[in-house]
Image: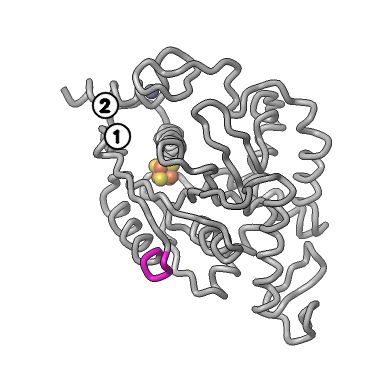
Amino acid sequence: MKCKRCGELAAVKLPSHHTGFCPDCFELFFRKQVETAIRRHAMIQPGEKVLVAVSGGKDSLALMRVLSDLGHDVDGLHVHLGIPDSSDPVCERTESYCRDNGFRLHVLRTAEVGLAIPKVKDAVRRPICAVCGKIKRHYFNRFAYENGYAALATGHNLDDEVARLFANVLRWDATYLGSQGPTLPAEGRFVRKIKPLYRVTEFETAAYCFLKGIDHWKAACPYSGGASFTGHKKLFADLEDRSPGQKTAFYEAFLEKGRPQFTGTSRNGMDTLYACSECGYPSSGEVCGVCRIRAQVAAAGA
Ligand code: SF4
Ligand code: ZN
């Protein structure tokens, strides 16, 4: 197959776009997809500072790289979770990538705020990933808000978004359907949340990392029970095989026709937002979920 743009030998085949690209033209394609996402969904205004949530995996490192290459002012925040045999090497790899590429990286250690994930796991009788996700979202937003970033960017790709949408549709969860999208506007102490990779697939992001020599962390978290929404992703992979372009069509149609039916809830799916009496950040009750978890961890350790 020849590159659609320059006619050289194609290195990356993209059936959903009925095309293939050589390495240089694939990079241009990838950047263009991200540029389009940013423009269509008013993600970043000129001169705004953006904080990238950096886990050290392929999506977040690709996101740092492409936003910077597009001329945006980006810093990273890595949340060190205190998980033995995992958090230290992930953090070191992320720091060395950012150092080598001239990116400013902040590191926040949850152990320093009373929330080392192994302790949380022992103290809280709930699936650890739900609790860990809540803690990470809280601190990414809080750091962005307190340090004057206009937006928080996460590395969710098209496969992540389609799988989440499908899960929400299966439950007809109106609250989540109303608050899912590539840009969630700022609201109170919530900074704007953006997903600039929502138009590129997991495969395209992996190809981008490979071609750009981005050395990302590949091992799964020891607490992970497998990637999230694996079953839904397989289902859509089958659909895409038989009929290329279905993932994009499903998600774009949701944005255009589906989501407007589910408006009216707040951006994080909470009907009413209060300020947490402990930390002051948005909460669905008097004390936010993260402050309640911290209290449980403290009580278990007492
Ligand atoms: Fe946290 Fe679960 Fe992800 Fe591990 S797999 S980092 S515990 S959300
Ligand atoms: Zn709180």
Q: Residue at x 33, y 56 (%)?
A: 91
236 up-or-down from 273: above or below: below
Q: Amino acid at mark 2?
A: Val
Earlier in the chain: of badge 2 and badge 1, it is 1
Residue 43 position, x and y percent, is: 64, 46
Query: Dot 1: what SS?
Result: loop
Q: Residue furthest front?
A: 47
Amino acid type shown at disc 1: Leu
Q: Residues within 10 Å of mark 2 (few under 14, many from 20)?
A: many
Figure quadrant, ligand 2 = top left
Q: Is-magenta flag for residue 101?
A: yes
Q: Which residue is mark 2?
A: 297
Residue, far left: 302
Residues in magenta, as a range: 98-102
Tell me if residue 247 is in the magenta stretch: no
Using the image as rendered, state which of residue 2 and residue 224 is in the foreground: 2
Query: From what the image shows, is residue 80 above or below residue 6?
Result: above
- Quadrant placement of the C terminus: top left
Q: Which of the 4 image quarters holds residue 29?
A: bottom right
What element does badge 2 sit on? helix
